[in-house]
Structures are given as structure tokens and as C-alpha cells.
Amino acid sequence: AQTVTQSQPEMSVQEAETVTLSCTYDTSENNYYLFWYKQPPSRQMILVIRQEAYKQQNATENRFSVNFQKAAKSFSLKISDSQLGDTAMYFCAFILNFGNEKLTFGTGTRLTIIP
Amino acid sequence: NAGVTQTPKFQVLKTGQSMTLQCAQDMNHNSMYWYRQDPGMGLRLIYYSASEGTTDKGEVPNGYNVSRLNKREFSLRLESAAPSQTSVYFCASSELRPATQYFGPGTRLTVL
């Protein structure tokens, strides 16, 4: 079974600074996807970024980027120039690409951006 | 496009009552899912439907039933609600590949 671990329950950072959220996962498979989802106080789950395991290049979406280390099974999220609107819970998630469509989530990191 | 919609947004039930949570998507996705989110935990899969006419159990199916009414709609039913089912429920949909799931706004359910 696949597992996803987020070891930082809470983090805080000053506005405009850079912050990195950690995620590790465990799988014996090679073909999978990894995601970061953001859940602001509104409760909506919003996709932040996606990484395909077969791609060596790290995914980037504007101020959000990942550091994907496949051998180490590590998938961290970097938020640059943090903004007040980045305050949210962040969940790391994993899914196999076999047609097994069960998304496995970590327990989340609560990120607070301080003005 | 509304994406994934869920009704109701909030619900309070008494133990033993039944209710159905509704979910609809307008993205023409084949796959749909129901999750629950409890404090301090990530989302856990209750049931999913890989395509119209099929449903499968997820990690925590006990106490729930589902119906994939058509390609757009996927409902979750609690036949006899229990306090342990107090949670926030999310519906999601995706294409088979890429496997990105898109979520509805959630339903906060309280069972007294």
C-alpha cells in the first residue's frame, strides 16, 4: 500500500519570504503522479501543482515549484514571494497511473503567512 | 463551467436518520469519487466510480452507499446516520488519464 507523510503539521513565514513544505511517500511502483492541493479556510480543495513520476524536470506553476527526488521518494513544495492568500492547509497526494485511481493524501501542513 | 457542485453545503442529522449527498460535474469526466475529511487527517476515499454504471469501495465504505446515476451525477447515501459519520464530505471527478482530480466545495455534516 502507498503511504504519504507530511512531517510538518504547522509552519509560518513572513509575507514575501520563501517557504518549503516537505512530503515523502512510499511505493514500490514506478509509474505514478504526485500532487499538492491547497485548502484555504473556504474549505475548497484547489490543485496547486502536479508532477508525473516519469518526468525528471521539476514542475513549476508561477510562484509554486516542486523538488521531486524520485530515488529518495521526496516531493517538496516551494512557495516563493509568499502572499497572504497562500495561508491554507496544504496536502500532498499520490496516485498510481495504472487505472487504479485511488488518491492517497498526507495529513497536511497548516501554513500561515504573517503580514 | 461550474466544475464539481455539491448539495447541501451544511446538514445536521439526528442519529438514525438518513440522507443523500448529491454531486454533479460538468467536465465530462468518466471517474467520480466520494471522500471524507476528519480533523487532523487527510481525505479518505469512501467510494468511487471509474465509469458510468460501475462503483467500487474505497478505504472507509462502511455505513455508506452510492449511486452513479449517469455520467454527470454521483450520490452518497447514509441509510442510518451515526455520530462517527460527522465529517466534511468531498466529491471529486477526473479523467482516467491524466489522473488529476477536481473537487467540489464540500458538505459539512453533523450527526447528533
Image (cartoon, coloured by chain):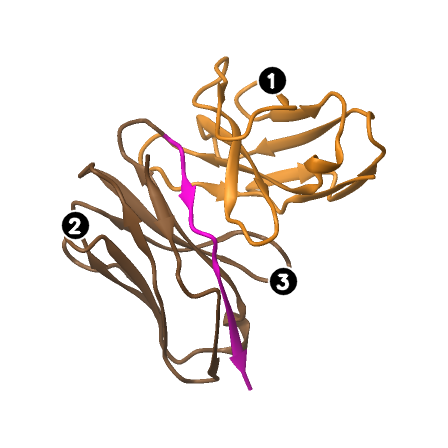
Chain colours: A brown, B orange
Chain letter for the residue marked with disc 3 in the picture: A
Question: Residue under circle 3?
Answer: A41
Say whether residue B19 is magenta.
no
- Looking at the rendered structure, whether the residues under marks 1 and 3 are on a common chain is answered as no
- In the rendered view, does A28 fall on the left or right side of B94? left
Tell me, yes or no, whether the two marked residues, 2 and 3, touch with CB atoms within 8 Å. Answer: no
Mark 2: few/some/many CA within 10 Å (<14, 14-19, 20+): few
Q: Position of residue A111 (x, y in %)?
A: 50, 70
In the displayed structure, A9 sits above or below A73; it is: below
Which amino acid, mark 1? Leu
Q: Position of residue B43 (x, y in %)?
A: 52, 44
Q: Secondary structure at mark 3?
A: loop
Q: Secondary structure at mark 1?
A: loop
Report, in whole angstroms, how far the alpha carbon at label 2 lies from the one at label 1: 37 Å
Which amino acid, mark 3? Pro
Question: Residue under circle 2?
Answer: A55
Mark 3: few/some/many CA within 10 Å (<14, 14-19, 20+): few
Mark 1: few/some/many CA within 10 Å (<14, 14-19, 20+): few
